[in-house]
């Protein structure tokens, strides 16, 4: 099993999931400041089935910062670990979701694949991925990663050590050591339109 899939599977453990889901309150301001928005093209694609429709009711579940509301869709910003330094960062941080982990979960029988056939209320799920590079510096990326739930639930010493390791890693990489760089993210999207 790929490392990304292992992280996603471990995150789903009930005790760990509950602890992580309750970790954001104290870091809400930092979370809102540092977390990337979704790719605009991904948002337009999600909202296309309801474009021009009268106002719709929305259930906003697990919305993070609440950046997007308005369609039955799931959006995830994932680190593009096809890029060597990003894969190295993911290996040491064990924090953020990766594209390979997203794809492994998506393709698992228990993941979103189970929803692909649709239902009597919704058409089959459509999937797309959108590039969503984010301008960062080593320090701003460390600040972003400090808002990940895995970091927030660590004891202070472990958190400080992990963030220092990440910062050291970024300052050693030619792509990330000389000021600003683009963090390659992908906005992965699942969307289901309501049947007429």
Image (cartoon, rainbow, N blue to C red):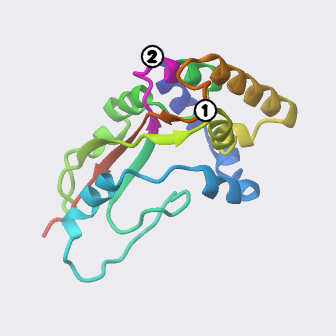
Q: Position of residue 142 (x, y in %)?
A: 67, 36
Q: Are marks 1 and 2 in contact (CB under 8 Å)?
A: no
Left or right of residue 78, residue 34 in this image: right
Which residue was labeled with disc 2? 1
- Please, which residue is most extreme toward the left here? 196
Front residue (pair 7, 40):
40
Front residue (pair 62, 177):
177
Whether residue 26 appears in this view of the structure is: yes
Quadrant, the C terminus: bottom left
| Distance between mark 1 and mark 2 Cα atoms | 35 Å
Q: Position of residue 3 (x, y in %)?
A: 51, 20
Q: Is residue 109 above or below residue 128?
A: above
Determine the secondary structure under disc 1: loop
Q: Residue at x 83, y 36 (%)?
A: 155
Q: Residue at x 27, y 60 (%)?
A: 44
Front residue (pair 182, 159):
182
Q: Position of residue 13 (x, y in %)?
A: 60, 36
The magenta segment is 78-87
Which residue was labeled with disc 1? 179
Q: Residue at x 45, y 16 (%)?
A: 1
């Amino acid at each position: 099993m790929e490392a990304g899939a292992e992280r996603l599977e471990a995150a789903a453990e009930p005790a760990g999931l509950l602890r992580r889901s309750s970790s954001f309150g104290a870091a809400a301001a930092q979370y809102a400041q540092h977390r990337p928005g979704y790719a605009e093209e991904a948002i337009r694609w999600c909202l296309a089935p309801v474009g021009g429709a009268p106002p719709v009711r929305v259930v906003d579940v697990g919305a993070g910062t609440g950046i997007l509301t308005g369609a039955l869709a799931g959006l995830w910003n994932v680190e593009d670990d096809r890029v060597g330094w990003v894969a190295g960062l993911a290996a040491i941080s064990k924090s953020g979701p990766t594209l390979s982990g997203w794809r492994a979960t998506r393709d698992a029988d228990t993941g979103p694949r189970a929803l692909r056939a649709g239902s009597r209320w919704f058409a089959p799920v459509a999937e797309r991925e959108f590039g969503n590079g984010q301008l960062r510096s080593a320090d701003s990326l460390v600040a972003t990663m400090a808002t990940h739930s895995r970091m927030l639930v660590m004891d202070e010493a472990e958190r400080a050590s992990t963030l220092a390791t990440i910062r050291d890693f970024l300052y050693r990489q030619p792509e990330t050591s000389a000021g600003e760089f683009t963090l390659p993210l992908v906005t992965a999207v699942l969307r289901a339109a309501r049947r007429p």
